[in-house]
Image (cartoon, rainbow, N blue to C red):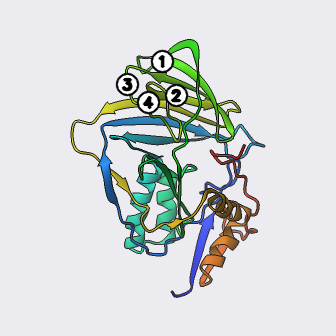
Amino acid sequence: MSARIIFFNLCLAILFASQAKAQIIVSDGTKIQNDTIGEAQILVQYETRCISNTEKPENVTEETMMLEVGKNLSKFYSYTKYVCDSVLAVDFANKASQETINEHLKQYGTSKLSERTFRGYPAGKVTTLDEIAGISRLRCEEPDERPQWKILAENDSILSYLCGKAECRFKGRTWTAWFTTEIPVSEGPWKLCGLPGLILKAVDSEGHYSFIATGVEQCHTDRPILFDGKKHEPMNRKAYNKVHERYYADPVGFITGSMPNVTIKVSDEHGNATKNPKNVPYNPLERGE
């Protein structure tokens, strides 16, 4: 690979959730293979809010997430990321300039929730896929662990569906969820599932994450559920978390360590050179107990 210089502006990024922001986009040219693993029967769109920097909770990231529910499996992913990635894939294929890429990042937005969660694929497992800076592709397969819910005697209405309320402690967070038995599928956002109806709203007790359904659609035409992780590097949860921690501790060092022929120059919105970001705030959705 020939030497390349990557420029990026602090005003464009997703790494810092407060003031100036920075993102590094790198492509190693790997073609992504999509395999059909099922057909979606129900689509659910969620408005998602997350706080990446817990020291500055006023800075909230919003994006659109999508849940595809099939027979005995589901896929949860960022629709915001899907749109942005589709545009960037065309840019990289056409060898677009860094200025064009930056403009598209500004136009289409970037994602703080890049993971895709597949429940029931493979059978009895939950698979999490992620990419870091476009170069490290990770796949983590785990047993399909269900939250232990406590159903409460409260009701609410979401999207005109009558909803019950439940609480649980799961993956390091305390969750409150509203579910509707009018849609009798035991699914929900992320790994939240196991209630006697579709979860339409879920919030964690610290206010760091919330998922609120903004639309539910029954699929009347073929809509394949696609899995793009066949070539991702398999690893256990501990190793998966370690890779993310290394990246957020030193994003530039992480990339140059993986791609020694790439040189990264960091500048602010005025083009002035600035220091490489270190110890970027990191508040993962899943935490250890």
SS category of the residue bearing label 4: strand
Residue ID at (33%, 40%): 71
Q: Is residue 13 left or right of residue 74?
A: right
Q: In this view, does 234 lie to the left or right of 205?
A: left
Q: Which callout, 2 or 1, points at the residue further toward the start of the chain?
A: 1
Residue located beneath label 4 in the image? 214
Q: Where is residue 30 in the image (x, y as percent from the top left)?
A: 43, 73
Q: Is residue 86 visible?
A: yes
Residue located beneath label 3 in the image? 183
Quarter of the figure with residue 135: bottom right
Quarter of the figure with residue 161: top left
In the rendering, which numbered label is found on residue 201? Answer: 2
Residue ID at (69%, 41%): 172
Residue 157 vs 93, above or below: the answer is above
Residue ID at (54%, 37%): 146
SS category of the residue bearing label 1: strand
Residue 184 vs 29, above or below: the answer is above
Q: What's the CA distance linking mark 4 and mark 2? A: 10 Å
Q: Which callout, 3 or 4, points at the residue further toward the start of the chain?
A: 3
Give whichever of 180, 15 is nearer the camera.
180
Q: Do the residues labelled 3 and 4 touch (CB within 8 Å)?
A: no
Q: Amino acid type of disc 2? A: Lys
Estimate how packed mark 2 is, as few (under 14), some (14 to 19) or many (20 or more) residues with alpha carbons within 10 Å: many
Residue located beneath label 1 in the image? 163
User: Which mark's residue is nearer the viewer, 4 or 1?
Assistant: 1
Q: Do the residues labelled 2 and 1 touch (CB within 8 Å)?
A: yes
Q: Amino acid type of disc 4? A: Thr
Q: Which callout, 3 or 1, points at the residue further toward the start of the chain?
A: 1
SS category of the residue bearing label 3: loop
Q: Position of residue 141 (x, y in %)?
A: 52, 56
